[in-house]
Amino acid sequence: MTKLFSPVQLGPLNLPNRVVMAPMTRSRALGNVPNDLMAQYYSLRAEAGLLITEGTSPSPNGLGYAHIPGIYSDAQVAGWRQVAEAVNAAGGRVFVQLMHTGRVGHPANLPLGAHLLAPSAVAAPGEMWTDTEGMQPHPVPGTMTEQDIAAAIEEYAAACKNTVAAGFDGVELHGANGYLIDQFLNTASNHRSDRWGGSIDNRIRFAVEVARAAAAAIGAERVGIRISPYGVFNGMASDADMDALYLRLIEALNDVGLVYLHVVDHSSMGAPPVSETLKVQLRTAFRGKYILSGGYDAARTNADLAANKGDLVAFGRPFIANPDLAQKLKSGGELKPADPATFYTPDAKGYTEF
């Protein structure tokens, strides 16, 4: 048996294997509320050691995309409870990824009364799908005030409590890929000169305060975080302080005691690679479990786990057309290709039916 299929302890959870289903946006939450179809989707993949859900907004302000779920209303909590019960019934363990989209959105995708807010009034590049107006450029967001920042941190804490109340095992804070936490970390989107911007300690402050609030709400042993050093998604850009910033962030998160660090390397999809030096430094510095991610196949997975480069490995797109991916990785079974045309469509095709 390879190390991938050996058990591992993750906080209070005893995972039967080290296969993680990475969070993937699938846009099936019509009305931003989880549903029966989503419960079926996640339960079909419950053989993985850990499932991490698609990005889920802790706030009406964070629903930047059409058809992504939230976890701030009673209806959303009830919908997610269906998902958690289905996964648990299938023997699985599941974390909810909390994703506030920040500047990556459009008012047409937000509920009444919500606002597009970000660290600074800097528009994200590119366009965004809206149901009512088709593709639209990202607008300039409003600059978050001290009150907005405090409210957002509290929304994360409340969402954590809702997640556990719905029956989930924990949360992953989405600090990667150019969403709100990453927008505070990155100088491309954070032009502030107050205590939330400028220096490394100021730019990591929002991530650390969200982590502290989440840990205070549900316990640090139920909270992980995902980061993407050198990522370029949603207009992020590297700077000379990039390595120092992430090492300082890890130092601060160690004080909080988060259960895992999930590091994204999208070089397999054309993004700049995360340097091996930084990966080793992050692995060495972080006291919790370390999840590897980014274009892994079985051979590379086994090699990196054997070399102790990480504790678990996350797989994304291979899970889309292969709900039984864990078994196929174990047996060497052939993987079916996914159909990109069904990645974000609203029905069962390419989601629970193939």
Image: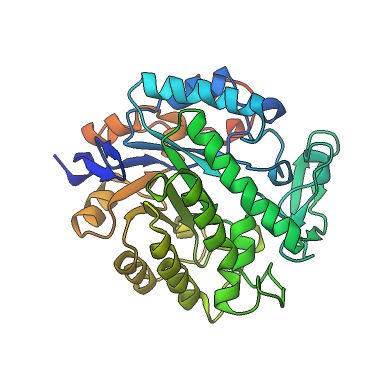
Q: Residue furthest front?
A: 216
Q: Is residue 124 left or right of residue 27?
A: right
> Which x, y percent locates residue 98?
56, 44
Residue beneath the point at 69% across and 26% down: 30
Front residue of 75 and 245: 75
- On the question of residue 352 being in view, the answer is no
> Which x, y percent locates residue 307?
20, 60
> Which x, y percent locates residue 131?
79, 33
Residue beneath the point at 65% across and 78% down: 198
Q: Residue furthest bottom?
A: 240
Q: Does 131 sit above or below residue 153?
A: above
Q: Does 214 sit above or below residue 41?
A: below
Q: How is the image coloured?
A: rainbow
- On the question of residue 333 being in view, the answer is yes
> Which x, y percent locates residue 132?
85, 34
Residue beneath the point at 41% across and 44% down: 222
Q: Is residue 45 left or right of residue 26?
A: left
* Image quadrant containing the N terminus: top left
> Which picture quadrant has residue 50?
top left
Number of residue marks? 0
> Which picture quadrant has residue 19?
top left
Front residue of 348 and 95: 95
Q: Is residue 32 left or right of residue 331?
A: right
Q: Residue furthest left?
A: 1
Q: Is residue 8 left or right of residue 168?
A: left
